[in-house]
Structures are given as structure tokens and as C-alpha cells.
Amino acid sequence: MKGRYASDQVPADDSRQNALTGELNIYYDAVVAALRNAASLIILGPGEAKGELKKRLVKNKLGGRVCAVEAADKMTDRQIAAKVREYFSTPRPRKGMQHGGRPRRRNGA
């Protein structure tokens, strides 16, 4: 590069990071809004985005709908559908229930 560059001509790393953070906030807000009516959620994917999405769902009082968070590499639509079918076809006790469908006793009652 030739010439001198004033600090206002080249954005600082902080301003680029702030811009990216703002874009991610808008993106996560849109995703959370789209998932608001979902009864159950399985979060699949690589990297840290899974955890960030779950934190955002918890913050928006939707964390109880998250059934599972699993690491997964790139998946096709068919692989995703198979994973969801497999997850929901396996019998699992409901929250507050023991195996066999009986409510848990609280405080020894």
C-alpha cells in the first residue's frame, strides 16, 4: 500500500466487530421470532452457534422447548429429517413424569 491512511479511512477492528455483532443480533432475533410457535426444538449444527441460539431461546423464555442440542457436521435435508424422526420416535419420559407415565412424588407425598 502506498500513501498514508487516516484512522477514519480504515475502520478499527472494534467497529468491524460491533457491526458483525449487530448483524448477528438481528439474525438471532429473526430466528427466535420464527421459532416462537414451535412446541419442541432440536438444535443441530457445528461450532458455537448452537449454544448461542439456545442462550437466546432461554432469554426469550423459550428454552424449555429445546429438547436436545447436538453437534453435527453439514447435513442434507434428508439427514436432518431422519435425525428428527429418530429423536422423536424414541420413547422419553415427559418432564415431571417417571417411566411408566406416573407423576413424580414431591416432598415424600
Image (tube, rainbow, N blue to C red):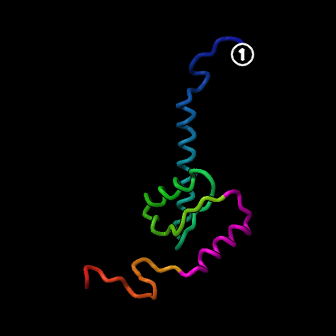
Quickly name the residue at label 1. 1
Please give the count of numbered marks on the rendered protein.
1
Q: Residue 59 sits in which quadrant?
A: bottom left
Q: Residue 73 sits in which quadrant?
A: bottom right
Task: Residue type at mark 1: give it.
Answer: Met
Residue displayed at 72% across by 67% down: 79
Name the spot of residue 3 as percent of width and height, x first. 68, 11
Residue displayed at 63% across by 15% down: 5
Q: Is residue 3 above or below residue 38?
A: above
Mark 1: few, some, or many residues within 10 Å (few <14, many ≥20)?
few
Most foreground residue, 88 or 100: 100
| Side of 60 relative to 35 (left or right) | left
Residue displayed at 57% across by 52% down: 49
Q: Is residue 55 above or below residue 68?
A: above
Q: Helix, strand, or loop for circle 1?
A: loop
Viewport quadrant of the N terminus: top right
Most foreground residue, 32 or 109: 109
* Residue interval drawn in magenta: 73-91
